[in-house]
Amino acid sequence: MSSNAQLFDRACRSIPGGVNSPVRAFRSVGGTPRFIKRAQGPYVWDEEDTRYIDYVGSWGPAILGHAHPDVVQAVREAALDGLSFGAPTQAEIELAEVLIERLPSLEQVRLVSSGTEATMTAIRLARGATGRAKIVKFEGCYHGHSDSLLVKAGSGLLTLGNPSSAGVPPEFVAHTLTLEYNNLDAVQAAFAQHGTDIACVIVEPVAGNMNLIKPVDGFLQGLRDVCTQHGAVLIFDEVMTGFRVGPQGVQGLSGIKPDLTTLAKVIGGGMPVGALGGRADLMAHLAPLGGVYQAGTLSGNPVAVAAGLATLRLIAQPGFYEQLARQTQRLTDGLRQRAHAAGIPFAADAIGGMFGIYFRDTVPASFAEVSAGDTGTFKRFFHAMLDRGVHFAPSAFEAGFVSATHDDAVIDATLDAAEAVFAEMKG
């Protein structure tokens, strides 16, 4: 049996940094990444056969818990018929129809293979449809790793301490206006100056890539109003929040209707699927109907679509989201109570099956506020919890995820571990 340290050593010789996505690295917290061998329900096991209660959930998709038997069976059945065709399938239509049925803002859908593809295409589509060049994004919001969006992005870039990415020429981001999240005055000022040149506003309607940050009252409606007034496209990036915070995502909870929506994670049930959808007149600009080109050999992959359809059917059960939200709230309330009992500055927030924990006195509302949190204390907490068999994201700038299999016993075990950790940290 290879240890995690041995595997990481080996990985570093053949993979840059030893990981295939920076958010998996432990550089911001120190130590060695856990190499996962298998997962079931709320648990993952590493290559040393250590079991962990998992709050990463494959960064969101595992809403049903890991390896749900119905999803696994759907994947097996689809795989027996072939792994990829490069041709249309009936299942693609079914997935598009389910998405349109569930999200009222969607009139048509294009399937892709990742959230990055979805957001990249949505930006291109907005520019192509409006004939404008500039886009508005927000500090700490991560919309994938396409060039024009890697400006003050969240997720792994925050964890690594980089406000943007090397390899992106300045002219590639010259048309990207980066504003403070939850600052509607800044948005209105940007449109007052550049309104006729702004193609779109792209936003995580609940941010999850600079930890969990909710929109303040009026922010999303203000974005809707200013985009309507100036003829810009409003894009909700619900790659993370779509079907994770509620049956209609944030747009269902807020009542705000975007022009375009990007999706991934939950709609693939753990397999690589992404989608963008929205108004039919906008979607008509996509090739082969229009001049905005997008293509992908594995778009609508039959195995991935099968996993997504199975997942979407299961989470449509009555009471699913109410129970998920209760368990998530139970976790965050319990963590907050135990931290405060130990005299440790701590705040927590939750929405649906997502949560955020912050080593500061209040829940943050912006990139600047979340950056002011105590990352040193987070590191101590992260490693102490990991040593007790609880797996949080290895970054103070990532939201956490609860699944339908995180029952009372699992939450109680987490809170017992946290109580012991907070007592140690106090001492």
Image (cartoon, rainbow, N blue to C red):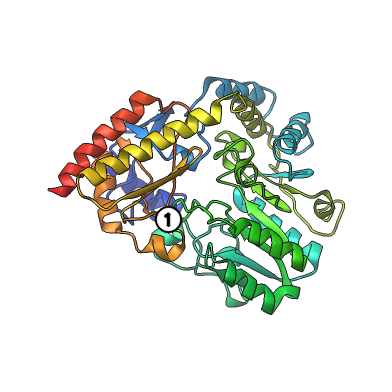
The quarter of the image holding the N terminus is top left
Provide the secondary structure element on which disc 1 rests: helix
Residue at the limit of the structure toward the right, as seen here: 289
Give the x, y percent position of residue 397.
41, 54
Residue 70 place in picture, x, y as percent: 57, 20
On screen, 193 above or below 37?
A: below
Where residue 328 sits: x, y (%)? 43, 36
Residue type beneath disc 1: Pro
| Side of 131 where 79 appears, left or right | left
| Residue 86 percent across, percent down from the top left | 75, 39
From what the image shows, is residue 9 above or below residue 141? above
Q: Is residue 151 left or right of residue 327?
A: right
Q: Is 392 rendered above or below residue 12?
A: above
Residue, disc 1: 16
Q: Horizontal placement of 155 versus 78: left or right?
A: left
Question: Given the current orientation, which residue lies at the most extreme bottom position?
Answer: 193
Above or below for 186 versus 145: below
Can residue 30 be seen in the rendering of this structure? no
Residue located 50% across and 40% down the image: 60
Give the residue displayed 85% in from the left and 51% down from the top: 288
Left or right: where 203 falls relative to 385? right
Which image quadrant is residue 303 in? top right
Q: Nearer the viewer, residue 195 or 95?
A: 195
